Image: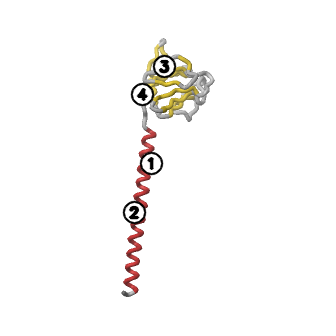
Amino acid sequence: MEPEILLLILRMVSAILLLGILTALFVIIWRDYRAAIAAAERSRRTYGTLVALAKIDQQLLPTGAQYPLLPFTSLGRAPTNSVTIPNSFASGEHALLALRSGQWWLEDRQSTNGTLLNGEPVTVPVIVTDGDIIGIGNHYFRIHLE
C-alpha cells in the first residue's frame, strides 16, 4: 500500500473518531441540560397559595393579593422573604412554612412579636392544613393547599 493512501485512510479514521467523540460529548451535555431544566421546574412548582386577608369589621376578607406556596416559604419584613410584610410589627425573618415529609409545618423564627395560627400563638413548629389562617401583626394569610 502506498504511503499517501495509508495517510488518507488514517486521516479519515481520525476524523470519524473525532466526530464520534464530539457527538457523544454533545449528547451528554444535552442530557445534563435537560435534567437541570427538569429539576428547576420541580423547584418552581407551587403547592398552593397564601391569600392575603384584611380585617374589616371583625371579619377577615381577601384583599386580592396571593402568594405562591413553595416548599420553603418565608414570611417577614426583609425583602429576601418569599412573602414580604411591609409592617414594623413583623420581624425581618418572621415565620417559615415548610413542606416536610408530605406535611406543611409553620414555625416562628424567633420573632419579636410572635406568629399566630388560627388565633393561637405558635411557640413550636406546628402542622398546618388547608384553610388555616396565619397572623403576623395586623396581616393575615389563609392557606390554600393543592
Quarter assignment of residue 96: top right
**Mark 2 crowdedness (10 Å alpha carbons): few <14, some 14-19, many ≥20:** few
x, y (%) of residue 112?
Answer: 63, 23
Local secondary structure at mark 3:
strand
Quarter assignment of residue 65: top left
Q: Residue furthest front?
A: 101
Local secondary structure at mark 2:
helix
Residue type marked 3: Ala
- Residue contact between numbered discs 1 and 4, judged by CB atoms under 8 Å: no
Quarter assignment of residue 27: bottom left
Local secondary structure at mark 1:
helix
Disc marking residue 36: 1
* Residue at horizontal 51 percent and vertical 33 percent from the top: 82
Ranked by sequence position, the earlier of labels 3 and 1 is 1
The residues bearing labels 3 and 1 have C-alpha atoms spaced at a distance of: 40 Å
The residues bearing labels 3 and 2 have C-alpha atoms spaced at a distance of: 59 Å
* Residue at horizontal 40 percent and vertical 81 percent from the top: 7
Question: What is the quadrant of the N terminus in the image?
Answer: bottom left
Q: Which residue is mark 4?
A: 145
- Residue contact between numbered discs 1 and 2, judged by CB atoms under 8 Å: no
The residues bearing labels 1 and 4 have C-alpha atoms spaced at a distance of: 27 Å
Local secondary structure at mark 4:
strand
**Mark 3 crowdedness (10 Å alpha carbons): few <14, some 14-19, many ≥20:** some
The residues bearing labels 1 and 2 have C-alpha atoms spaced at a distance of: 20 Å
Q: Which sits in the foreground, 67 or 118?
A: 118
